[in-house]
Image (cartoon, rainbow, N blue to C red):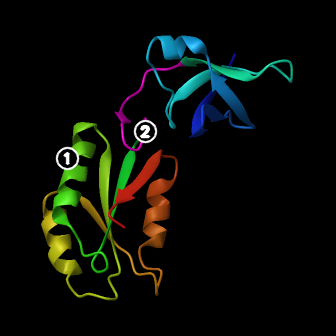
């Protein structure tokens, strides 16, 4: 048995990173019988069959959290991306995503983009930062914010979501 993490799932195939190799695997039939679906982010045990048969996901370890849409597990950080213009920032969507992240014990990080096209960043920064949330200002023209996001990604399982 080899331990790894599912990094991609497409059409019933799961790609498991074991640290030195990524294996294409199918889930064992007993998961379907128990109505369990492997998710990207799951820590798993696999059997590698060296060409004789398909590689298989044999065990899914306990999840610390999971999302239904998109189907992900064991997230540390959820980056909520919102633009100031085109599409206009939608605080209802941001608030719903923050609530879901907090409920699932995932750190929400608000990433506000297109700050070069609108001056209202400070207004949203003040609201969400004073509520205790990390807010990152991103400017595609200058690259502002990219380094901060890269730092927050290191050593964590993260996902990006939002209306942009």
Magenta stretch in the rendered image? 60-74
Q: Nearer the viewer, residue 68 or 97?
A: 68
Q: Quadrant of residue 163?
A: bottom left
Relative vertical location of residue 36 with respect to residue 18 in this rendering, above or below:
above
Where does residue 70 sit, x and y in percent of width and height?
Answer: 41, 44
12 left or right, relative to 77: right
Residue 164 shown in magenta: no
Q: Which part of the image, by quadrant, shows the C terminus?
A: bottom left
Residue at the (22%, 59%) spot, across then down: 94
- Magenta segment's dominant SS is loop
Relative vertical location of residue 128 with respect to residue 7 in this rendering, above or below:
below
Q: Which mark is residue 68?
A: none
For mark 1, what is the residue?
99
Q: Are marks 1 and 2 in contact (CB under 8 Å)?
A: no
User: What is the CA distance from the residue labelled 1 to the residue labelled 2?
Assistant: 17 Å
> Total label count?
2
Q: Quadrant of residue 136?
A: bottom left
Label 1's element? helix
Label 2's element? loop
Relative vertical location of residue 78 with respect to residue 113 in this rendering, above or below:
above
Mark 2 packing: few (<14 Cα in 10 Å), some, or many (20+)?
few
Front tag of 1 and 2: 2
Q: Which mark is residue 71?
A: 2
Where does residue 141 sit, x and y in percent of width and height?
Answer: 46, 87
- Sequence-wise, the earlier of marks 1 and 2 is 2
Where does residue 52 sit, x and y in percent of width and height?
Answer: 86, 18
64 left or right, relative to 47: left
Where does residue 104 sit, x and y in percent of width and height?
Answer: 28, 37
Mark 1 packing: few (<14 Cα in 10 Å), some, or many (20+)?
some
Residue at the (48%, 25%) spot, across then down: 37
């Amino acid at each position: 048995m080899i331990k790894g993490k599912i990094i991609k799932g497409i059409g019933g195939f799961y790609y498991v990173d074991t640290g030195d190799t990524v294996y294409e695997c199918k889930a064992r039939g007993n998961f379907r019988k128990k109505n369990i679906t492997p998710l990207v982010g799951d820590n798993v045990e696999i059997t590698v069959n060296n060409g004789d048969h398909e590689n298989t996901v044999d065990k899914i370890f306990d999840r610390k959290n999971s999302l239904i849409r998109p189907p992900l597990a064991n997230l540390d950080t959820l980056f909520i991306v919102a633009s100031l213009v085109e599409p206009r920032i939608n605080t209802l969507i941001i608030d719903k995503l923050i609530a879901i992240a907090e409920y699932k014990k995932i750190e929400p990080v608000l990433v506000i983009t297109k700050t070069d096209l609108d001056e209202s960043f400070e207004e949203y920064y003040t609201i969400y930062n004073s509520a205790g949330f990390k807010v990152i200002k991103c400017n595609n023209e200058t690259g502002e914010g990219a380094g901060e996001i890269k730092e927050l990604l290191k050593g964590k399982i993260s996902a990006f979501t939002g209306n942009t």
